[in-house]
Every structure is written in C-alpha cells, then in structure tokens.
Amino acid sequence: YLIMLAMAGSLMISYTRARAEALGLDCRVGLMPRAERVVLIGSAALFFGEAWDGLVLKGVIVLLAILTNVTAFQRIVWVYRRASGVPLDAPVPAGTSTTEGNSESR
C-alpha cells in the first residue's frame, strides 16, 4: 500500500503542476519536486540497495509516500488560492488552437 501511495502522490504532483500551467500559473512549490524524488530513491538504492534486508529502501518509500502527498496537497492549495481570479472560459491564446486546418471562413 505504501508503494501505491508514493506513486499516487508522485503522479498528483506532476498532474497538479500540468493543470496549473494550463491555467497560466507556474506552480513550483512543495517539498518533493521530481529532482528530489529521484535523488532520494536513487541514492538509497545505489548506496544501500538490499542491505539490512532492504530496511533503508523501505524507509525511503515510507518517506516518499508521506512527502509526495504533502507536496501534492501544497500544490493543490497553492493553485486554488492563485487561480481564484482566472476565468475558466477565457479564449485560447493565439497559436495554440486545437483545430488545425479549419481556418476556412464559412
């Protein structure tokens, strides 16, 4: 369950940032952005691996499960506070149209 919780938190961090950028916000807040997650789990796997019956790696997974969800919550709150004035039905900026090839006037 802890691995699933860590994965869900990690996905929510990326998803929240992507949705914030879609609203025009630069959401780089939180304790565990991608670089920190990679360094934490990578260094634990590289230096300790299965030593001590994988206890260090299990501890890192527990830490990731907690901190990734805290970071996702921080980002959700940050976006909520800053996006209160962003109109959801605003026109799409020029050059980012989703209907390419339909430039004919009717």
Image (cartoon, rainbow, N blue to C red):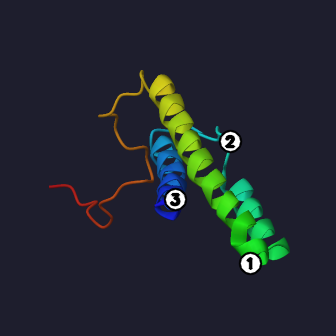
Which residue is painted at 36% across and 55% down in the image? 97
Q: CA distance from mark 3 to mark 2?
A: 18 Å
Q: Secondary structure at mark 2?
A: loop
Of residue 22 and residue 51, the one placed in the foreground of this image is: 51
Which residue is painted at 35% across and 28% down in the image? 87
Of residue 74 and residue 58, the one placed in the foreground of this image is: 58
Q: What label does residue 31 carry, if any?
A: 2
Q: Amino acid at mark 1?
A: Glu
Identify whether 89 is placed above or below 95. above
Q: Quadrant of residue 38?
A: bottom right
Which residue is painted at 42% across and 22% down in the image? 84
* Residue 75 placement (x, y as % from top left): 54, 37
Residue that numbered label 1 is attached to: 50
Residue that numbered label 3 is attached to: 2
Q: Amino acid at mark 3?
A: Leu
Which residue is painted at 64% across and 39% down in the image? 30
* Residue 12 placement (x, y as % from top left): 48, 51
Mark 1 vs 2, N-terminal side: 2
Mark 3 vs 2, N-terminal side: 3
Q: CA distance from mark 3 to mark 1?
A: 18 Å
Foreground: disc 3 or disc 2: 3
Q: Secondary structure at mark 3?
A: helix
Q: Residues within 10 Å of mark 1 (few under 14, many from 20)?
A: some
